Amino acid sequence: MKCPYCGYEESKVIDSRPTDEGARIRRRRECLKCSQRFTTYEVVETVPIVVIKKDKSRESFDRNKLLAGLLKACEKRPVPTEILEKIVDEIEIILHNSLEREVTSMRVGELAMERLKDVDQVAYVRFASVYRQFRDINTFMDELNKLLQEKK
């Protein structure tokens, strides 16, 4: 494994442990040249999930892109990054466990919103406003009214 600090290609594993219910293995490594420590994750290679976007173009599912969207929605909100990573993990597991290898961006967005609604309602509305492309204040108010109805 190449050291991210000095680029040396030899390192030793200091600690290994399973994460995400055994879906990944987290390894702490130490560079044999500069002695810096870093973390790597091993993931079983799977068939990639293809996301069909609104414009009908296709791209591989990118967990980092989903996480970035969730982070943006939760900006300046008291939501720990670990919770957002768990949401992304859950969505990724759901997508991999489905028999479909192609999924619409609508499905990915809906899965994210379902989970975000339970974590932080302000972040949920932010995510929904971008995801559902609210065009005016009425569509925004409709979504807020739905939240208020669910709360009652």
Image: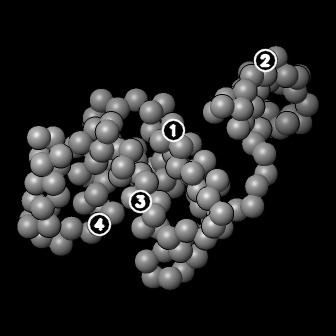
- Residue 59 position in % (x across, y down): 60, 71
Name the disc covering residue 132, or none.
Answer: 4
Say which of 116 and 152 sits in front: 152
**In which quadrant will I find the N terminus?**
top right
Distance from the alpha carbon under mark 4 to that under mark 1:
22 Å
Say which of 57 and 109 sits in front: 109
Q: Label 1 near label 3: C-beta < 8 Å?
A: no
Say which of 8 and 55 sits in front: 55
Sequence-earlier tag: 3 or 2: 2
Name the disc covering residue 85, or none.
Answer: 1
Question: According to the image, label 3 marks what residue?
Answer: 109
Q: Label 2 near label 3: C-beta < 8 Å?
A: no
- Residue 143 position in % (x across, y down): 17, 58
- Crowding at dot 1, Cα within 10 Å, few <14 / some 14-19 / many 20+, comes out as some
Residue 7 left/right relative to 119: right
Q: Label 4 near label 2: C-beta < 8 Å?
A: no
Q: Label 3 near label 4: C-beta < 8 Å?
A: yes
The amino acid type found where label 1 is placed reads Glu
To which quarter of the image does residue 137 belong? bottom left
Distance from the alpha carbon under mark 4 to that under mark 3:
9 Å
The amino acid type found where label 2 is placed reads Asp
- Residue 141 position in % (x across, y down): 9, 59
Mark closer to the observer (2, 4): 4
Query: Which residue is at 48% across, 53% downward?
Result: 66
Distance from the alpha carbon under mark 2 to that under mark 4:
43 Å
Query: Which residue is at 51% across, 38% downward?
Result: 85
**In which quadrant will I find the C terminus?**
top left
